[in-house]
Image: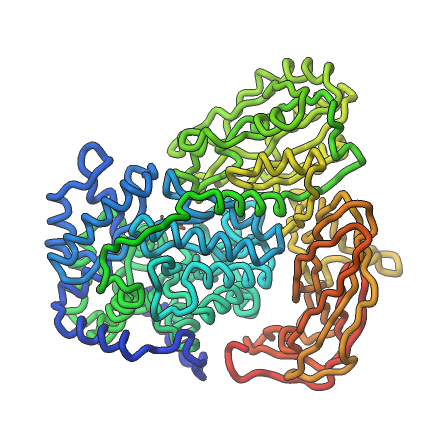
């Protein structure tokens, strides 16, 4: 089995030429330093650099500090080059984290003379530091359609991570969330490749700073993840196989990674699952071919958690550990995250000695690890003394609040919102009094536990109590689960429903906070995308009182509510807005602030109809003439890009600079947007294109540009986009990019115009 995979990969690899330009320019000094260090290394030291272990292998028995004897063994004896994670699945303060990393660095310099690289899952800000700053999750930042927030979060994340003596974050996440059943939808920037690419690129630049060869003490290395196609498992369950057509892989799934590689991303983490039957960790075509060969990328590829072992333990493409390590490293893996097993170092040594891994592949991988460490300045300063006055600052808190404000999406409003000042409000639902659910997973702990760490921030209940004079609370339902091993996050106690209904009778309006408890990765798998039956029952019974119900959806993925949505007077999806999300919501519900978020995903209505906005034109068509009906219906709850405001916007004068164009042209597209309501507001202006006739069935539309603008009542602004004609190309059945002669429709805010491409161009290079 192993041999056939490798042969297949080699054939496909050969088909990938020609090579593209270097993704990161080489720096002579960096390379000289790498060569110098490499020359002096033993085989054992080289193998150690290629292995990353979890911090638990260094914990003492209190599980709160490092055991020096274990340090001697792991760093001194095995010469392991990288450590990850937080101790005991509990985050620490900056000070405690820094002290631990310092200890590891000192040992590493003394025993190997090479600094260790420590990596942390900083997912939405410094999510693994108890005193750091947190921002809304990426799915929320996507809903702002405002690149600035990806930049601000990336900047703060790098700064605060560095403040804890750590120089590597496993962020940004850029798995396209194109299957709402998947439990990691909320970790990335939504379903659209362009939005995802733009936001992730901005975050990458902000985390690393301007020069990837010289990262300063306020910036860190990214690990863009999970390369790639991880977000569309056929089963909807985490870490299970995906089937993706090669043209889709190139055109959509690769797009955000390509943007980040080109922006200088220094490392990438590999998709834990498989595509078209090939586990990504041994997919030489993707790892060595698309990334290293075609992009000339000299960065480092790290595995995901225990995924080399998964090649034999789970995927059955390798017979044993030796074969698995051989396959992974020969496919292009440079560092193995083998969380608990330093023996992996010896396996690498033996494989090199027996010739199953060549010296040149070994040296290439080690060079990439060393290059990362040199670029981060870790050789010069394995530990650093530097002031970080903005750590945990008000400044970062204000940014987080502003991002939350722009991210919460008003999906429906029959006029009940803004809430009246003196209304008597019943706050109910399992998400009403929880910080944990506002933050989601990767918040202080893996599965998320904000309530324990940061009780100082407001829950929705608390924020509404501060803003409105008459607020009562009856939860109706509470989440029971807190134990990820038991996968009990879905368990609910609904014994309070009657009490909540009774309280509703005395209220003017009901604010029902529903959705999901926190989860992360595989423990978040589930069997029904519908909102839980108990929560639906709560909403039905509340609505039966005749009092208006405002639904607040606090959830990591769009749980289906098609049957209860008609019962709601208003619906707001706050997703996972983090520590200031409730304050933002109170300001929005009261009308102190205006909504401006838009959905970065399609909100589906029916369980058998889970779609993305860029569906194929054939998926929605009129009834055919004649006696048979071959129609197709696209019926979603709310489309991608949907989001209401307390004001209204009118679009006019949609103009394109040329009617006819060729592949090398740039089209200037402009539109006037007027705030036609009586209060100020922000609007995300979205530009779409549609290829009207193509050699493959075209997508109905594709997002090609977005800008967020702010308009006072009555004000008009002209928004201008520079659209590269090549952006309208697609990947054909032969895997090559093509822009075909014919008509395209451009549209924006209900305005549309048609333009014509006068010649067909097919690119020779794999990327454009
Ligand atoms: C996740 C990654 C994460 C890694 C290290 C894995 O289980 O898939 O996203 O970076 O663990 O914690």
Residue 636 in picture, x, y percent from top left: 72, 47
Left or right position of 198 against 166: right
Residue 103 in picture, x, y percent from top left: 18, 48
Residue 657 makes an appearance in the image: yes
Quarter of the figure with residue 215: bottom left
Residue 660 in picture, x, y percent from top left: 76, 82
Quarter of the figure with residue 320: bottom left
| Vertical relation: 698 (above or below) 14 | above
Residue placed most toward the observer, 653 or 386: 386
Residue 90 in picture, x, y percent from top left: 33, 37
Residue placed most toward the observer, 707 or 704: 707
Give me the residue at 46% from left, 71% from top.
262
Residue placed most toward the observer, 575 or 690: 575
Left or right position of 90 against 757: left
Q: Quadrant of the N terminus?
A: bottom left
Residue 12 makes an appearance in the image: no
Give me the residue at 84% from left, 60% from top.
624
Quarter of the figure with residue 752: bottom right
Q: Quadrant of the C terminus?
A: bottom right
Left or right position of 637 against 70: right
| Vertical relation: 172 (above or below) 26 | above
| Vertical relation: 356 (above or below) 585 | below
């Amino acid at each position: 089995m192993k041999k056939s995979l490798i042969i297949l990969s080699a054939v496909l690899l050969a088909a990938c030429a020609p090579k593209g330009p270097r993704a990161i320019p080489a720096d002579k000094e960096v390379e000289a330093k790498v060569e110098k260090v490499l020359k002096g290394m033993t085989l054992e030291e080289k193998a150690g650099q290629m292995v990353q272990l979890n911090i638990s292998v260094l914990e003492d028995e209190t599980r709160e500090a490092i055991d020096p004897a274990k340090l001697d063994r792991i760093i001194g004896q095995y010469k392991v080059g990288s450590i990850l994670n937080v101790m005991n699945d509990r985050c620490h303060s900056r000070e405690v984290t820094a002290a631990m990393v310092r200890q590891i660095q000192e040992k590493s310099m003394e025993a190997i003379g090479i600094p260790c690289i420590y990596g942390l899952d900083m997912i939405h800000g410094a999510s693994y530091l108890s005193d750091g700053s947190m921002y809304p999750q990426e799915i929320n930042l996507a809903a702002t359609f405002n690149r600035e927030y990806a930049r601000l979060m990336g900047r703060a994340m790098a700064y605060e991570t560095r403040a804890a003596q750590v120089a590597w974050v496993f962020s940004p996440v850029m798995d396209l969330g194109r299957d709402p059943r998947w439990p990691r939808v909320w970790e990335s920037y939504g379903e659209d490749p362009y939005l995802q690419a733009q936001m992730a690129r901005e975050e990458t630049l902000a985390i690393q700073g301007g020069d990837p060869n010289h990262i300063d003490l306020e910036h860190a290395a990214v690990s863009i993840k999970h390369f790639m196609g991880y977000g569309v498992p056929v089963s909807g369950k985490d870490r299970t196989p995906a089937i993706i057509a090669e043209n889709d892989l190139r055109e959509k799934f690769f797009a955000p990674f390509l943007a980040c590689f080109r922006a200088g991303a220094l490392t990438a983490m590999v998709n834990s699952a498989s595509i078209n039957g090939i586990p990504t960790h041994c997919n030489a075509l993707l790892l060595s071919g698309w990334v290293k060969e075609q992009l000339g990328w000299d960065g480092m590829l790290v595995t995901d958690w225990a995924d080399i072992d998964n090649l034999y333990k789970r995927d059955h493409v390798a017979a044993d550990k030796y074969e698995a390590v051989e396959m992974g490293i020969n496919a292009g893996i440079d560092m193995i995250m083998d969380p608990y097993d330093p023996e992996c170092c010896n396996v690498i040594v033996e494989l090199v000695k027996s010739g199953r891994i060549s010296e040149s592949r070994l040296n290439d991988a080690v060079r990439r690890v060393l290059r990362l460490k040199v670029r981060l300045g870790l050789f010069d300063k394995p530990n650093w003394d530097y002031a970080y006055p903005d750590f945990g600052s008000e400044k970062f808190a204000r940014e987080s609040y502003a991002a939350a404000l722009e991210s919460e999406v008003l999906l429906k409003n029959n006029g009940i919102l803004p809430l009246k000042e003196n209304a008597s409000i019943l706050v109910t639902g399992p998400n009403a009094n929880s910080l944990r659910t506002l933050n989601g997973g990767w918040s202080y702990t893996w599965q998320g536990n904000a309530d324990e760490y940061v009780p100082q921030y407001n829950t929705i209940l608390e924020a509404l109590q501060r803003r409105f004079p008459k607020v009562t609370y009856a939860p109706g339902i509470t989440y029971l689960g807190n134990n990820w091993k038991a996968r009990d996050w879905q368990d609910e106690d609904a014994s309070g429903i009657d009490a909540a209904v009774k309280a509703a009778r005395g209220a003017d309006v009901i604010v029902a906070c529903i959705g999901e408890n926190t989860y992360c990765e595989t423990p978040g798998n589930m069997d029904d995308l519908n909102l839980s039956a108990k929560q639906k029952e709560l909403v039905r019974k509340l609505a039966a009182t005749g009092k208006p119900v405002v639904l607040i959806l606090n959830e990591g993925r769009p749980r289906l509510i098609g049957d209860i949505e008609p019962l709601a007077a208003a619906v707001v999806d706050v997703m996972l807005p983090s520590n200031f999300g409730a304050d933002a919501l109170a300001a929005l519900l009261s009308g102190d602030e205006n909504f401006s978020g838009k959905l970065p995903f399609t909100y589906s209505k029916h369980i058998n109809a889970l779609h993305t906005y860029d569906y194929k034109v054939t998926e929605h068509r009129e009834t055919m003439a004649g006696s048979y009906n071959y129609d197709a219906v696209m019926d979603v709850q709310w489309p991608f890009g949907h989001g209401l405001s307390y004001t209204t916007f009118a679009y006019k004068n949609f103009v394109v600079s040329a009617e006819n164009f060729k592949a090398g042209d740039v089209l200037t597209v402009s539109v006037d947007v007027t705030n036609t309501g009586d209060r100020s507001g922000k609007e995300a202006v979205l530009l779409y294109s549609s290829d009207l006739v193509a050699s493959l069935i075209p997508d109905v539309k594709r997002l090609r540009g977005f800008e967020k603008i702010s308009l006072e009542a009555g004000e008009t602004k002209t928004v201008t986009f520079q659209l590269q004609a090549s952006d309208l190309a697609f990947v054909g059945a032969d895997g090559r990019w093509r822009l075909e002669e014919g008509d395209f429709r451009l549209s924006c805010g209900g305005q549309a115009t048609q333009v014509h491409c006068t010649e067909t161009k097919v690119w020779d290079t794999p990327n454009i």
